[in-house]
Image (tube, rainbow, N blue to C red):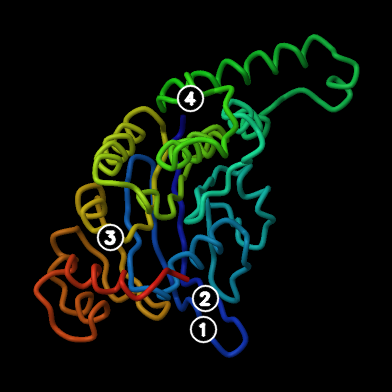
Amino acid sequence: MTAAKLEVQNVTKIFGGLTAVRDFSIVVETGQLQGLIGPNGAGKTTCFNLLTGVYRPDAGKILLNGKRIDGRRPSSITSSGIARTFQNIRLFRDLTVLDNVRVACHLRARHTLVGALLRLPNHYRDEAHIRAHSIRLLERFGLLDRSEELAGNLPYGDQRRLEIARALATDPKILLLDEPAAGMNPAEKIALKELIRQLLKDFPVGILLIEHDMDVVMDLCDRITVLDYGQIIATGKPEEIQCDEKVIEAYLGCPAHSVEEAVQKDLERGTDV
């Protein structure tokens, strides 16, 4: 598969008199794992909503492989190759684990409505391919033995993994992960980090990660972009961000010894916007 490039150029989003994101720019390419961090309310999830068509930018451009995707519907952006998970898990809770993945696979289905209604051979071939692909994904994520359970009945960590599997079922070029480690215990976080590392080896994607857990961010990301009040205040390698005075001050409001300390205190104040 051809390498992909997501380019965000000076994107701004204003809600009434509040500028939630100002001049946000980032480039994510196949094989890269980049982090997007910042204090609560910094605008991280707003950026994801802009990238996936939930919001339309008031200024700036969003391009995937050189083609503008800003202003398009979320379904169209997903079809173009951008998939996401959510800070608050959004599975189809009353569908089985297998059907959650099968629904996502249908984005790339080739059969037509007429073929489905008439039960033409192409319909059956496509459905067999979708089922086989879904089963491979569930096996890859350690969920195959729970394929017939309702998604809403899964343990929390399994629901997180299912949401990532469902996103990958759309065959994305760029994968956006919104706090995948939220609510996980230490053992689950270790397993998640290994899973994300393996994803970059097994799938031709680039990953943009929002995460409050600095151990996850610093351990996984090639580069990190830091937002504060909707603006980028720092971009660099993890070791550079960890000691950046602007970043530490953004989290604590005063000098501190580490970003980890700052984030821990920030987490005690609530959830992100």
**Residue lying furthest bottom in this view?**
17
Q: Which residue is mark 1?
A: 19
Q: Are marks 2 and 1 in contact (CB under 8 Å)?
A: yes
The answer to which of marks 4 and 1 sits earlier in the sequence is 1
Where is residue 105 drawn, in percent x and y? 62, 30
Query: Which quadrant of the figure has residue 239?
Result: bottom left
- The label on residue 170 is none
The amino acid beneath tag 1 is Thr
Residue 126 drawn above or below residue 181:
above
Above or below, comparing residue 205 to residue 59 in the picture = above
Frontmost residue, 227 versus 137: 137
Identify the residue shown where x is 59% and y is 25%. 98
Kind of residue at disc 3: Ile
Which residue position holds label 3?
A: 224
User: Crowding at label 1, few (<14), some or many (≥20) Cα neighbours within 10 Å?
Assistant: some
Q: In this orientation, which residue lies closer to the viewer: 118 or 266?
A: 266
Percent across and percent down for residue 272 are: 43, 69
Looking at the image, which residue is at 80% across and 9% down? 121
Q: Which mark is residue 137?
A: 4
| Residue type beneath disc 4 | Leu
Please provide percent x and percent y for residue 178. Answer: 44, 54
Residue 12: mark in rendering: 2
Q: Secondary structure at mark 3?
A: strand
Distance of label 2 from label 4 (alpha carbons): 36 Å
Crowding around mark 2 (Cα neighbors within 10 Å: few <14, some 14 to 19, many 20+) is: many
Which residue appears at 62% of the width and 29% of the height? Answer: 96
